[in-house]
Image (cartoon, rainbow, N blue to C red):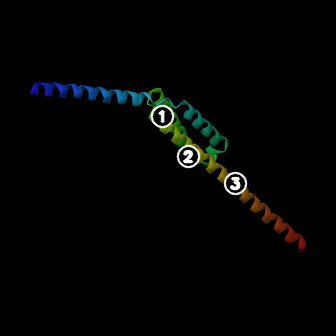
Amino acid sequence: MNNNHSRFTQIMRSISLTAVAAVLVAGCASIPAPTEQIAVSKAAVDNATSAGGNEFAPVQLQSALEKLNAAERAMAEEKNLKARQLAEQAEVDAQLAAATARAAKAQKAASELREGNRVLHQEIDRKAQ
């Protein structure tokens, strides 16, 4: 009887280990390569660059580029979960760079308009005297 119990325990351990291994392999295999997310991130970086990210948000844009490159390396190494996370972070950094650049451009344009208005008011005041 003790021998049967020991044999049963060994069989159950083998089945458990096999099940755990199968779940781990299936879990790793079920994460697809994030090719679409990387493409979205590249588009966000391009958008940030054309919005003036190099001039107005260089730190955020550089961070996005570094994370995008790391995501591509991780995907090449088939570390798909890490690649997806890095690509998502790159997209967010690129969006921040684009928004920062647009805000800085808007601030600059507003300052130029205020200065133009100030000059016009001076000219009007000068002609009124």
Q: Amino acid at mark 3?
A: Ala
Indicate the amino acid at tag 1: Ala
Separation (CA) of disc 3 from disc 2: 18 Å
Amino acid bearing label 2: Gln
Instruction: Give the residue at x 51% y 42%.
Output: 89
Say which residue label 3 marks. Answer: 106
Quadrant where the N terminus is found in the figure: top left
Residue 128: where, in percent of width, then height? Answer: 89, 73
Query: What number is the disc on residue 83?
Result: 1
Residue that carries the numbered disc 2 in the rendered image:
60
Horizontal and vertical percent position of residue 22: 35, 27
Task: Work out whether 110 lies above or below 51.
Answer: below
Q: Secondary structure at mark 1?
A: helix
Left or right side of 75 for 6: left
Which residue is depicted at the point 52% across and 40% down? 88
Q: In this rendering, does residue 66 appear at all?
A: no
Q: Secondary structure at mark 2?
A: helix
Left or right: residue 12 versus residue 38 is left
Which residue occupies the foreground of this view, 43 or 34?
A: 34
- Residue at image coords 55%, 44%: 92
Mark 1 closeness class: few <14, some 14–19, many ≥20 residues within 10 Å = many
Which of marks 2 and 3 precedes in the sequence? Answer: 2
